[in-house]
Image: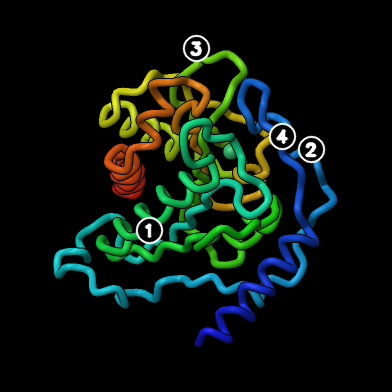
Amino acid sequence: MRLIFALVTAIVVLLATVSSTVHAPGVLGEEASKGASSVDQPTDLSSFPYHLSPAGSSGPPPDARNSPLFNKVIVIDPGHGGDDPGAPGRHGESEKDLTLDIGRKLQALLEETGARPLLLRSGDQEVSLYERPALANQVGADASVSIHLNWYQSRWVHGLEVYYYHTHPASVRLAAAIDGQLLSQLGLTDRGITDEQTYVAVREVTSPSVLIEVGYLSHPTEEKLLHTEAFRQKVAVAIRDGLSQFFSGK
Ligand SMILES: [Zn+2]
């Protein structure tokens, strides 16, 4: 088992290295430079060790069938990973660690509802920009959520941003649902939902998809919150509730 894990890890590292992209934070909307590259198109994705929960396999509670999320294939994309840390954490973990933690929490919450989450990286791996949406499309996702934390040179900028692209007409409704839940449950400042074509994570996905910048690691208060496990759990709960609201059609 350990040998298999090592082999799988080696494959992931190799593929990620081959197709890695450079991402330098530092401009408003730290993802602003993303998406300009067209060089790392996905190749063979069959050897990726991603595990899509089979329907009903996670032992959801009996009433899970009544959940709007039941059997929904939901791709969770924790931003960055491996050699790409994303936004730095001056007083703790960097963006890649925190997005993974939120992603894992969201995965657990979704499994409880009988949904079928697919976490695009389960550890500190680098998955390239184009492989992420390609995997979402390959598994036939019902929805896709990319999780990021923002950074800006000024320490005063703060708040929640949710991005979508009109590739899928329902993406704006998904963005509004998740944005609304995050705002009402976390009390963050609203920086709005934006139709944005530069983000590969939402532009290249054929199902409803959003990219969430939960807050700014460069802002002292939000940095402190994002480094608090209880706050990250709240973030995951709010995203789950936004997804549930979206699939309930409300
Ligand atoms: Zn990011």
Q: Nearer the viewer, residue 2 or 249?
A: 2
- How dense is the environment of label 4, judged by Cα within 10 Å: few (below 14), some, or many (20 and up)? some
| Residue shown at 66% from the left, 76% from the top | 46
Q: Which mark is residue 107?
A: 1
Vertical placement of 23 versus 187: above or below? below
| Residue shown at 66% from the left, 77% from the top | 47
Q: CA distance from mark 3 to mark 1?
A: 32 Å
Mark 2: which amino acid?
Ala
Observer-side mark, 4 or 2, equals: 4
Mark 3: which amino acid?
Trp
- How dense is the environment of label 3, judged by Cα within 10 Å: few (below 14), some, or many (20 and up)? few
Question: Where residue 118 appears, x then y in whole percent?
Answer: 47, 63
Q: Which residue is mark 2?
A: 36
Q: Which mark is residue 24?
A: 4
Vertical placement of 35 versus 39: above or below? above
- Whichever of labels 4 and 3 marks the residue nearer the N terminus, that label is 4
The colour style of the image is rainbow
Q: Secondary structure at mark 3?
A: loop
Ligand 1 lies in quarter = top right
Mark 1: which amino acid?
Gln
Res 8 seen here: yes
Mark 4: which amino acid?
Ala
Q: Nearer the viewer, residue 229 or 141?
A: 229
Q: Which residue is mark 3?
A: 156
- Whichever of labels 4 and 2 marks the residue nearer the N terminus, that label is 4
Q: Secondary structure at mark 2?
A: loop
Position of residue 51 in the picture relative to residue 81 (left or right):
left
Observer-side mark, 3 or 1, equals: 3
